[in-house]
Image (cartoon, rainbow, N blue to C red):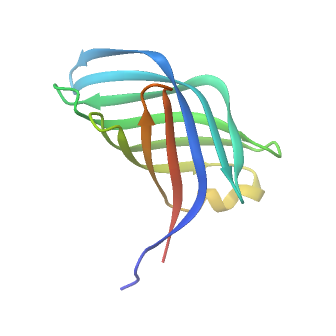
Amino acid sequence: MPTPELRHVATMTARLGGDSFAIKAPLGRRLIVEVEEVTIEGDRLKAHMVGKSAADWLTVADDFSWGSLDVRFTLETDDGALVYVEYGGRADLAAGKVISAPVFHCGDERYDWLNRTQFVAVGSTDRETNLLTYELYEIGV
């Protein structure tokens, strides 16, 4: 059986919007947090968020101690390729810790490796600055 290994790809930083709101919905409470800015800095991937359609539509526990992520945004690489990103995961809202599994979609052949790779990201939130910083890893076998 192959053993998975993690290889660091980049650091991803997201500036979260200062305003968020919660609604009670049929599948649980939703905490909607807008994302104002995303940057990714790594040897093979350098990109920043484009557009304004970016948010995390978390499903949260009644006590708001943890949440299930539902995040989507679009990036533009430093050499002009567009990349759609979506991910789920879990957030320990009380501790500010986050684990996610980003999926990248890109039609530019220079970044086809993103389409073929499974990633995991481990992050933490700084509530004073509203920054969420992830370390992004590809999973290899």
Which residue is depicted at the point 59% across and 50% down?
11
Numbered circles on residues, count: 0
**In percent of the image, x 26 and y 34: which residue is there?**
94
Q: Where is 115 relative to 27, above or below?
A: below
Q: Given the current orientation, which residue lies at the most extreme right position?
A: 79
Q: In this view, does 23 lie to the left or right of 5?
A: left
Which residue occupies the extreme left position in the image? 62
Instruction: Please state the horizontal and vertical placement of residue 113, each as a whole percent of the image.
Output: 65, 62
Query: Which sits in the foreground, 67 or 18?
Result: 18
Question: Residue at position x 48%, y 26% from top?
Answer: 130
Residue 136: x %, y % from top left: 53, 54
Give the quarter of the figure containing the N terminus.
Answer: bottom left
- Residues 13 and 49: in front is 13
Q: Where is residue 138 in the image (x, y as percent from the top left)?
A: 53, 63
**Residue 61 shown left or right of residue 20 in the figure:** left
Q: In this view, does 78 lie above or below 18?
A: below
> Residue 26: percent from the left, percent from the top?
20, 22
Give residue 39's quadrant in the image: top right
Q: Quadrant of residue 47?
A: top right
Q: Which residue lies furthest to the bottom in this view?
A: 1
Q: Spot the residue most to the front.
A: 128
Query: Is 43 placed above or below 103 here?
Result: below
